Image: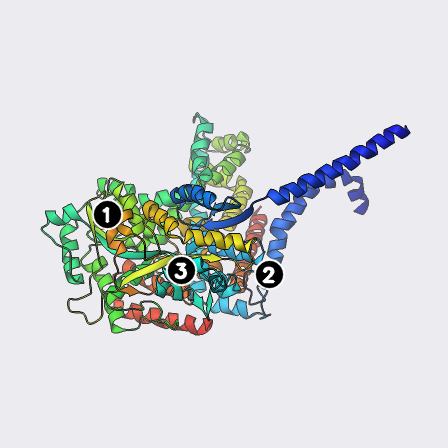
Amino acid sequence: MLKEIWRERVSYVFILPIIVVYFVFSIYPILTTFHLSFYDSKIVRLGPFVGLQNYRDVLTNASFQQAFVNTIVFTFVSTAVILAVSVVLAVLVNLPYVKLKTLFKVIFFLPVVTSAVATGYTWKWMYDPTFGIVNSFLSLLGLPGPNWLSDPDVAMISLIIVNVWKWIGYFVVILLANLQLIDDDFYDAAAIDGANALQRFFHITIPLLRMAIGLCTVLGIVAFMRAFALVFVMTQGGPDGRTELMVTLVYKEAFGTGLLRIGFSAAASIILFAFIMGFTLLSNRITKLRV
Amino acid sequence: MKSLRVFLGVCMILAVAAAAFASGQKEAAAPAKVTIWYETNLDTAIKRLNPMFEDQSPDIDVEWVKQDASQLSPKLIAALAGGVGPDLVIASQKRLSPAEMQLEAWSDISQYMSSDSGLASAVDALPDSHVKGYTRDGKVWGLPFFVRHVGLFLRESWMEEVGGSIPEDWQEMTDLAKKLTTEERFGYGIFGAAGTTSTAGFQFMYSAPAAGIEYPILDASGKPNFDSDRAKRVAEWFYRWQHVDKITAPATPSWTHKEFYAAVQAGQVAMGRVGGWNVNSWENSDHPGKDFVVFEYPPMEKGQADPNYQYTWNDGISMQGEPKNPQATVTFLKFLLSKDAQGVFVEELTSWAREDLEFERYLGDNPRLLYFARQHPCAPDMAYHQNFLPVMEILSKHLNALLADSSKDPEQTMEDAYEESMKKYREIN
C-alpha cells in the first residue's frame, strides 16, 4: 500500500489541500465537540471535567426528549413524503412525450437554491390565518384554513410542507438522472408480456431505482435531522415546544439564554450525531440487503 | 565587479534606512483607533456623529461595525475571549450581560469617572435606576445608552369612528379593542412567539407592570417572581384577548416583534405596544402615519393600589477590559454620552439616555414623541441578571402554549411556568 501511495504521490499532493480543509472544518470540530461534552464548558473556558453528567442531563431533559421526538417526526415524514412525490414527479417528467424536461428540472430546483431564511419568512406570511394566501385560496374552495403555525396540532405539518416544497427538486434531479439510465428494453419486454403502466412502475422502475432511493433516503435523513433555519425563522420551536428540533434546542442552550451551556450542547450534538450515523448505516445496510 | 557590489550594498543600506524612516513616520502619524460594535440601526446618526467627533478629536479614528443582534452575544464573547474584541459595544443590556457574567470582560468605568469629570458628569445625567443595573459588586461594567420607554399606541381616527376614548383600565381597553376589531384588522396586537426576546414573555413583561407588578419576571434578588395571584390574572387576560374576546391576531403565537411591526404598518392593528424608536418610522409610513396617539399602559383596574408601572428597558454601552487605546476609547465614550451626541440620537432615532436634554428643542411639539420624554412610573429592567434569559425562555414557552391552545388553563400555565423557572433558578444559583 505504501508503494502505491508513493507511486501516486503527485495525486495525493493535489488532494492534500481539501483533506486539510476537511480535517480543520469537519473532523477537528467533531473531535473537539466530543471532548467538550465531558466538561462543564463555557464558550472559551474548558471548565471542570464532569464525565457523563452532560449526557445524563440531556437524556433526562424533558425539552430534549420532546425535541428528539419532534426531530424524528420531522425527518421521517419529510423524507417519506419527498421520496414518494419526487419519484412520481421524476417518472412523469421522464415520460417520452414530455417536452422541455430541462425547464421542469429548473422549476423544481428553484426552491432548493432559495435561501432557507427567505423561504421561511415568505411562507410565514403565506400561512397567516387571516391575510395569508394559503387560507385565502382554501376559502375560495370553500375549505376552512387552520392556524398553520399557531395551532399546536398543525404547526409541525406546516413546517413539513415547507420543507418538502423546498427540497423536492433536489431529489427529483437525482432520481431523474437515475431513471434516464434505465434501459428501455426492460419496459419493452414487460409491455410485450402484458404488464400495464402501474405494474411496470412497481416491478421495474422502483427496483431499478432502489440504490438511488437509498441514497436519497440517507441524504434526506442526514439533512433533515440537522434542520434549523426554517424552524428558527417560522416558529422558534413553538407553539408549546411542538416544533422544537434538536438543533434549535442545542442552539438555544448554547447561545440563546446567555448561560453558554456549551458542554450540555456538545453532548446533545454528539447524541444527534450518533443517531444520524446509526440511521445512515442502517439505511445503507437495508438498501444493500435488498439489491 | 567590486564597484557593482559596493553599489548594491549602498542601495540596500539606503533602502533599509528609508523603510525605517517611513515606518517611524507612519507610527508617529497613525491616529489612535477605536472599534465600536453596534446592533441597532444607528446609521443615520453615525453619519452625523463622525464629522462631529472628527472635528473634536482628529487624532482618533473610529470604526463602526454593525452586527446582527441575534449573533451578537456569542460573537462578542468569542471575540473578547480571543483578545480581538471591539473597544466599545452598544447593544441591548441582555446581550451585553453574558460577557460580564461569564467572563467579566468589561472595564470598570467608575475608575475612569474618578479622573475624568466630564465622564462623571455625563454619567450623573443618566437615570440612576438604569446605571444601577450595570453595577455589580461596585463595578460599573456598562452604562445605559438608550433608555427605552414603552407605551401603548392607538389609531386615533379609528377610535373616533367608534366613539371611543383612551382606555383607563384593561376592561375599557378590551371593550374598545372589540369595537375596533373587524375582518380587516385586530383591535389589539401582541407578540406571542416562544423564545427569549420579543416573545410572549416579553409581552408579559410589558403588561404585568401596568397591573402593579413592579418586578414582573425576576425580583430584585434575581428569583422568578410571577407566582402571585396578580401575575395569574395577567395570564387570564392574555387568554381572554386571544381565545374569548378574540381581539388579537390568530397568528399571535407565531408573532415576534417583527411580525407585529409588519402588521401595524400594514394597517392591521388598532392598538399595541409602541416605543420611542418606532415613532419616526411609523409616522413616515402609510400606516399608522401620524394617525396615532401614545398613552401609558393603563392599570388593570381603576383604583388599583399599585401604580401602573411602565416597563423601561435599555440598550447599553460597555468598554472592553483591555481596549487598544484606553484614553481614546474613553474620549469617544464621553463624546457619545455628551449632550450634543445624545441630541443627534434623539433627532435621528428618537432614542436617548440622558435626562437633561432639551427635548422640546429636538422633538418639537410632536405629542407622540414628547410622551417618551416625560417621566413615568418605571418597572426596572432586570435583563442584566444571569437568570433573566433562561427564566424568560421558560415563561415564554408556557405563555406561548397558552396563546396557542384554548384548552390550557391560565392559572395552571403560570404555576407550571413558575415551577419550571424555579428549577432552573436552583440549577443556575
- Classify A186 as above or below B402: above
Place of residue B383 in the rendered image (x, y in percent of width and height, measured from the top left)? 39, 63
Q: Residue at x 54, y 70 (%)?
A: A53
Q: Are marks 2 and 1 in contact (CB under 8 Å)?
A: no
Give the residue type that dot 3 points to. Ser
Q: Does the image show residue B392?
A: yes
Place of residue B228 in the rendered image (x, y in percent of width and height, measured from the top left)? 28, 73
Give the residue type that dot 2 points to. Phe
Instruction: Tell us which disc is closer to us: 2 or 1.
Output: 2
The residue beneath circle 3 is B121
Depth order, front residue of B137/B16: B16
**Quick one: label 2, few (<14), some, or many (20+) residues within 10 Å?**
some
The residue beneath circle 2 is A34
Place of residue A186 in the rendered image (x, y in percent of width and height, measured from the top left)? 53, 33
User: Residue furthest toward the left?
Assistant: B163
Instruction: Tell us which disc is closer to us: 3 or 1.
Output: 3
Q: Residue at x 57, y 69 (%)?
A: A52
Placement of the N terminus of chain B among the 4 image quadrants: top right
The residue beneath circle 1 is A144
- Res A72 quadrant in image: bottom left
